[in-house]
Amino acid sequence: MSFFKRLFSPKAVSVPKSDQPDNTLGFEQLPLFTGMLTAGDFPALEDAYQAAPWHEQALIAEGLVNQLASSAAPLETWIARRPAAHLPFLLTGMILTKEAWDARSSKLAKDVSLEQTKAFVDLLNSARAAFLGAIERNGSDPQCFSRMLPVLMGLEEEEEVLMTYFEQAKALVPDHLGAHMAMLNALTPKWGGSIEQMDHFLATCCDIKTWPLLTGVHLSAMLETWIQLNFDGQEEAFRTYFDDESRKAAVLSLYKAYKDPQDAGLQTYIVRNYFALLLIRTGEKDLARQEIKNLEGRMTMLPWKLVGIHNYTTLSRL
């Protein structure tokens, strides 16, 4: 059996199911990639990453960043040994992005200190430089363009600038869920956009008949609209948002029409997480529980963080 056939065999390894939200969605082959990183076998890691489909590359990158959280020293060695490789630059950008958002915190803009703002901007500028380095070395990896979007959003770049990177990601993978989610987030009112801009984006860039995985973007938009009512102090509208019969019907219609695309791998669980929450909010609790049963080890931070649910144990009791 060839190296790559063994590498991508579904029985390659067994990973315990996590009770916590998992940004790798329980990707079972991840230890093979993190093992190469630990061993310093950078050429093999680069080849294995390149051989993986886009939806697995997204999870591999997340898993490698998780491992590098304790020490980013291997990246320095990697870049020194393999200066033409794009992957360590991509990972560096992802780490710097996370550090930037951690420095800023989740406070409202008016509550972020000058020191936090400076650290945030400095780290984002460093992340942008890292992503540009990755793109210069490999312009065919959609992760590089997708991961640039939250950086540009944080730096308050114009929508046209973000759309340039989004369109490059979409040209490479038309239903790249991460890129679409990131672009939608940048268009929300809390980041200077509007409901109208979100709706236009959904109508022009998120065709769910052709690309069913993008159903997740429509579900996210619905939740963002709901949350915005709370931000705007519209308490009654926020409280009754999901009581609207047409909205209930819209969620149920999307759910009945949705079929997991065969070429999206574990990314489909992101959509299923959003469906589970929206089914709960619209009173379809039996359908929600069916979905929740399948989310053990595949729970995502969003959308559950929005409603204060932070582990599968709590989720499974709904």
Image (tube, helix red, strand yellow):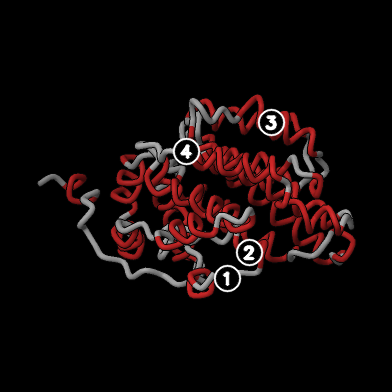
Q: Are marks 2 and 3 in contact (CB under 8 Å)?
A: no
Instruction: Give the number of the mark in front: 1 or 4.
Output: 4
Residue at which label 1 appears? 310
Give the distance between the C-alpha atoms of the residues marked 1 and 3, in whole angstroms.
30 Å
For residue 114, which numbered disc appears in the image? none
Q: Quadrant of the C terminus?
A: bottom right
As helix, strand or loop, the secondary structure at mark 3 comes to: helix
Which comes before the other along the chain, label 4 or label 2? 4
Q: Name the residue nearer the viewer: 53 or 256.
A: 256
Residue at which label 2 appears? 305
Residue at the extreme front of the image, as rendered:
245
Give the distance between the C-alpha atoms of the residues marked 2 and 3, in whole angstroms.
24 Å
Residue 304 drawn above or below residue 200: below
**Circle 3: is it few (<14), some (14-19), or many (20+) Cα within 10 Å?**
some
For residue 201, which numbered disc appears in the image? 3
Residue at which label 4 appears? 258
Residue 205 image point, x, y percent = 62, 27
Q: Is residue 139 at least partly visible in the picture?
A: no
Give the distance between the C-alpha atoms of the residues marked 1 and 2, in whole angstroms.
6 Å
What's the residue type where badge 1 is placed? His
What's the residue type where badge 4 is placed? Tyr
304 relative position to 286: left or right: right
